[in-house]
Image (tube, grey):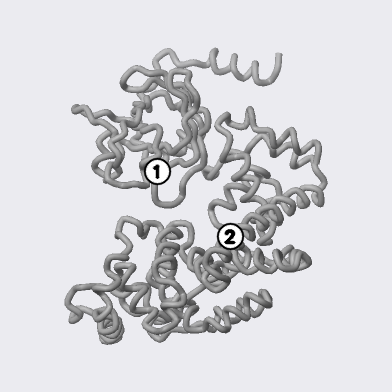
């Protein structure tokens, strides 16, 4: 008999004749999410309308705005898994109460999970009026406390073969993926250059990078609707803020003196051109503000884009040399009298100066724009990219590292370099995001053996 068997017998023999009264504790939404992600509720369910639902992939825990779990996969009645997000709420009516039905970020939700149905029947619908399957969880089935801390993602089946590879070989896999990724970026930039010219291609690419993940599309639209050639003639900041829809139309008396002066100057230059450009305005629905750090607000990034345009000959020279130290130095010195101390055009001034473009975003520009262009022209520039340090890793990169390397010390080392981060992202996109079988049918672990 094993020690585990003996302990089980000990529990049975020591059972109380009169069980203790157990008062269920009210779980917080975060605790419910942790139980769900840990699989404590299981993965086989019945929807409220009687269909069999199986969670094939629990996805990744979304730490930003939007549904609770992204990149999940759910099968209904034994059908092919549907990729999308999962939202977990304490009550069924929270979907409507929290505005998810009007939020396009929730359009790809494939399962709505809750623990209380309420007395009235609530339907889960998206902006496009698509019905989302609902699952009512039984909280009484939980027998343990939620795991703490809860990882953002579940390690994949490739962790074991990657751990078995010598470190240099694992690094080589990621560098190969990074090189492949840069070639794709270079090809896209070459197409853009062929269509619009070298300067416009560089300008559009830098604008998209300033948009971050959340606002890449509206920044791209702005760069397309307001070409560099036009903005270099003057009034770049007024046109950018006017077409973006970020110029406040309220009484300026409520603002501080610096803001009144700044906004009035923009309006005086935007107003004569408003009729000409207003039809190009970006719809407010395109902008994503939730989950943004204050210093990363898109209004500050528009000011940075205006600064780039003002110094365009310097930007062109930085592209040609692609020297990381010079690129970082330029953006460290990029100043704006107003935006050095404001988060938005309606915020109170900050006492401490803020960089218009931080070091991590400059590294993103090097990885996504400057180095792809440089390596396309001179493949030997790859050596410089391999040594480029990455000051920070974003959530997607950290999730990719967790999926591929779990808690291996290698993951932390690989996150220190921009090229290895790019490699992690490429593997994650090529394999993890294309798999809806919870790693069972993913070819990557098998292909590692032949690397």
Q: Residue 213's x, y, as percent?
A: 48, 57
Q: Residues within 10 Å of mark 2 (few under 14, many from 20)?
A: few
Label 2 sits on residue: 191
The residue located at (76%, 52%) in the rendering is 171
Instruction: Tell me where residue 249 sits by quadrant.
Output: bottom left
Query: Which numbered disc flags the more N-terminal residue, 2 or 1?
Result: 1
> SS at mark 1?
loop
Label 1 sits on residue: 67
Q: Residues within 10 Å of mark 1 (few under 14, many from 20)?
A: many
Residue 100 against residue 197 in the figure, above or below: above
Q: Residue 153's x, y, as percent?
A: 55, 42
Q: Nearer the viewer, residue 353 or 2?
A: 353
Residue 196 against residue 425 in the figure, above or below: below
Residue closest to the far front? 195
**29 sits left or right of 149 in the view:** left
Q: Is residue 42 visible?
A: no
Q: Nearer the viewer, residue 243 or 363?
A: 243
**157 sits left or right of 301 in the view:** right
Image quadrant containing the N terminus? top right
The residue located at (58%, 71%) in the rendering is 198
The residue located at (60%, 81%) in the rendering is 329
Labels 2 & 1 near each other (Cβ < 8 A):
no
Q: Is residue 274 visible?
A: yes
Q: Residue 310's x, y, as percent?
A: 47, 83
Instruction: Tell me where residue 449 sits by quadrant.
Output: top right
**152 sits left or right of 410 in the view:** left
- Measured in 3D between alpha carbons, the distance from the residue under mark 2 to the one under mark 1, in whole angstroms, is 35 Å
**330 sits left or right of 103 in the view:** right
Q: Residue 363's x, y, as percent?
A: 60, 67
């Amino acid at each position: 008999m094993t020690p585990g068997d003996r302990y089980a017998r000990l529990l049975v023999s020591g059972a109380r004749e009169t069980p203790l009264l157990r008062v269920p504790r009210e779980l917080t939404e975060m605790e419910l999410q942790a139980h769900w992600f840990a699989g404590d509720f299981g993965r086989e369910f019945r929807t409220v309308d009687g269909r069999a639902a199986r969670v094939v992939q629990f996805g990744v825990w979304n730490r930003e705005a939007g549904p609770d779990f992204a990149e999940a996969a759910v099968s209904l009645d034994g059908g092919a898994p549907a990729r999308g997000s999962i939202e977990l709420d304490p009550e069924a009516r929270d979907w409507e109460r929290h505005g998810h039905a009007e939020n396009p970020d929730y359009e790809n939700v494939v399962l709505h999970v809750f623990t209380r149905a309420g007395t009235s029947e609530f339907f889960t619908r998206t902006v496009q009026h698509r019905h989302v399957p609902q699952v009512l969880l039984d909280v009484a089935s939980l027998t343990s406390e939620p795991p703490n801390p809860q990882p953002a993602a579940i390690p994949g089946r490739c962790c074991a073969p990657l751990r078995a590879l010598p470190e240099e070989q694992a690094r080589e896999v990621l560098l190969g993926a990074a090189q492949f990724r840069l070639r794709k970026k270079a090809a896209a930039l070459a197409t853009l250059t062929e269509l619009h010219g070298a300067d416009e291609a560089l300008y559009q690419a830098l604008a998209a990078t300033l948009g971050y993940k959340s606002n890449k599309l509206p920044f791209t639209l702005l760069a397309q609707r307001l070409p560099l050639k036009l903005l270099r003639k003057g009034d770049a900041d007024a046109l950018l803020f006017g077409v973006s829809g970020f110029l406040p139309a309220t009484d300026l008396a409520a603002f501080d003196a610096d803001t009144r002066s700044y906004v009035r100057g923009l309006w005086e230059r935007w107003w004569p051109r408003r009729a000409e450009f207003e039809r190009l305005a970006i719809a407010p629905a395109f902008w994503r503000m939730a989950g943004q750090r204050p210093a990363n607000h898109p209004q500050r990034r528009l000011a940075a884009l205006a600064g780039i345009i003002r110094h365009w000959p310097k930007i062109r020279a930085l592209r040609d040399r692609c020297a990381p130290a010079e690129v970082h130095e330029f953006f460290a010195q990029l100043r704006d009298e107003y935006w050095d101390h404001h988060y938005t055009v309606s915020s109170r001034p900050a006492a401490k100066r803020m960089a218009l473009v931080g070091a991590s975003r400059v590294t993103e520009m090097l990885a996504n724009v400057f180095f792809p262009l440089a390596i396309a022209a001179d493949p030997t520039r790859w050596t410089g990219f391999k040594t480029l340090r990455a000051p920070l890793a974003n959530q997607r990169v950290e999730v990719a590292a967790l999926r591929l390397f779990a808690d291996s010390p290698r993951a932390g080392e690989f996150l220190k370099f921009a090229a290895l981060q790019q490699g992690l992202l490429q593997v994650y996109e090529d394999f993890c995001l294309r798999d809806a079988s919870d790693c069972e049918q993913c070819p990557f672990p098998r292909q590692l053996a032949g690397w």
